[in-house]
């Protein structure tokens, strides 16, 4: 069982009604203490599956009254006589209902509030983010110079480019346009830094374009669409379970960094046809990741609490899916007709 601790600071005048509602939610333990003359402190130990409902309720009351504060604290260990007795029962249940338990685990996710915190970190343009992008662009450019696949893969692991793209999709699902703008700008900044570094390196070093690393990133195929869609879905699921480590594998799989380097190199050398191919590959990767992420996040049922926000999220979610689908369809058309023209 995964447990979390909710600490709610409740004004005295609202305590009785809020306390009654909170006790109705399933919980493992419930403690009340006097935090000050004006407020009471309620500490609730609950299963992770119940966290979102309780936080939604506390959010709704905090919107209409002053003095409410809520903290969510992860619990690594909880021991009591009851839990020790339950442990044996749970193991028996797992054996008897193994398949059912596995099915339920597939649908598990962190609460909306935890995910918002997780996603907001990936949408910020911080010094760490900028430095990692800069260093990954340097490493990736060197990989192109040396025609070293290992070095290029290393640069993909360093580059945190997929985080802001996933954050953009999450913000679109919630209709949070402020977060959407921040995440989109962070993504564009990352792409811009990589392209500029590649252009600068093109003038400093004699970068040859007769390499496998370069030519592999100057054209788009159907497999690139499928790869980006699958990687976007995997990145979204990793985000839902707050498994940042899994995003490293997604970064390598979808390869957002190398096409940007190829684009910068092509611009620096004036190879406009190759630059166009690299630009299409970058756009395909980003749009397919967005499409997968929007669909995955929609299926999880993540919604705001307040009515106005729910309405805005419903509109934003539909528009996001339609918008990204149109772009992906346009890209497929451009690539298909481009191949037909080349063939003729």
Image: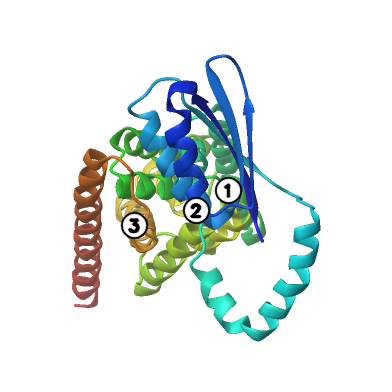
The mark lying in front, picked from 3 and 2, is 3
- Residue reaching furthest to the top: 37
Residue positioned 59% across, 60% down in the render: 249
In 3D space, how far apart are the residues under numbered discs 3 and 2 (Cα atoms)?
24 Å
Q: Which residue is mark 2?
A: 258
Secondary structure of the residue carrying numbered label 1: helix
Residue 339 in which image quadrant: bottom left
In 3D space, how far apart are the residues under numbered discs 1 and 2 (Cα atoms)?
7 Å
Q: Which residue is mark 1?
A: 140
- In the displayed structure image, the side of residue 343 where residue 271 appears, left or right: right
Mark 1 and mark 2 in contact? Answer it, CB < 8 Å. Answer: yes
Residue 336 showing in the rendered view: yes
Residue 216 showing in the rendered view: no
Q: Is residue 332 above or below residue 29?
A: below
Quadrant position of the N terminus in the picture:
bottom right
Image disc number at residue 294: 3
In 3D space, how far apart are the residues under numbered discs 1 and 3 (Cα atoms)?
29 Å
Q: Is residue 190 above or below residue 76?
A: above
Mark 1 and mark 3 in contact? Answer it, CB < 8 Å. Answer: no
Residue 142 x/y as whole percent? 61, 46
Secondary structure of the residue carrying numbered label 2: helix
Residue positioned 32% across, 27% down in the render: 64
Mark 3 and mark 2 in contact? Answer it, CB < 8 Å. Answer: no
């Amino acid at each position: 069982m995964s447990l979390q601790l909710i600490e709610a600071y409740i004004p005295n005048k609202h305590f009785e009604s809020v306390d009654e509602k909170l006790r109705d939610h399933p919980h493992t333990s419930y403690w009340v203490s006097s935090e000050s003359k004006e407020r009471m402190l309620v500490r609730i130990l609950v299963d992770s599956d119940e966290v979102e409902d309780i936080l939604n309720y506390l959010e709704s009351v905090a919107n209409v009254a002053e003095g409410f504060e809520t903290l969510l604290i992860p619990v690594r260990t909880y021991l009591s006589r009851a839990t020790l007795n339950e442990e044996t029962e749970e193991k028996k249940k797992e054996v008897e209902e193994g398949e059912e338990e596995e099915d339920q685990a597939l649908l598990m996710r962190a609460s909306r509030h935890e995910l918002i915190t997780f996603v907001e970190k990936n949408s910020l343009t911080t010094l760490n983010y900028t430095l990692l992008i800069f260093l990954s662009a340097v490493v990736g450019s060197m990989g192109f110079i040396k025609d070293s696949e290992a070095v290029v893969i290393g640069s993909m692991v360093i580059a945190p480019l997929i985080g802001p793209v996933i954050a953009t999709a999450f913000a679109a699902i919630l209709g949070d346009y402020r977060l959407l703008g921040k995440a989109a700008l962070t993504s564009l900044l990352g792409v811009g830094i990589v392209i500029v570094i590649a252009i600068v390196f093109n003038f400093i070093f004699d970068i040859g374009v007769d390499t496998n690393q370069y030519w592999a990133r100057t054209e788009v195929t159907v497999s690139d669409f499928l790869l980006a869609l699958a990687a976007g879905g995997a990145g979204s699921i990793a985000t839902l379970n707050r498994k940042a480590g899994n995003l490293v594998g997604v970064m390598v799989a979808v390869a957002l960094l190398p096409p940007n380097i190829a684009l910068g190199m092509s611009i620096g050398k004036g190879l406009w046809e190759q630059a166009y191919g690299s630009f299409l590959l970058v756009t395909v990767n980003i749009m397919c990741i967005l499409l997968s992420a929007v669909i995955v996040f929609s299926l999880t049922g993540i919604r705001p609490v307040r009515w106005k926000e729910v309405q805005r999220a419903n509109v934003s979610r539909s528009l996001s899916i339609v918008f990204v689908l149109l772009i992906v369809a346009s890209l497929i058309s451009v690539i298909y007709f481009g191949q037909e023209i080349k063939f003729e």
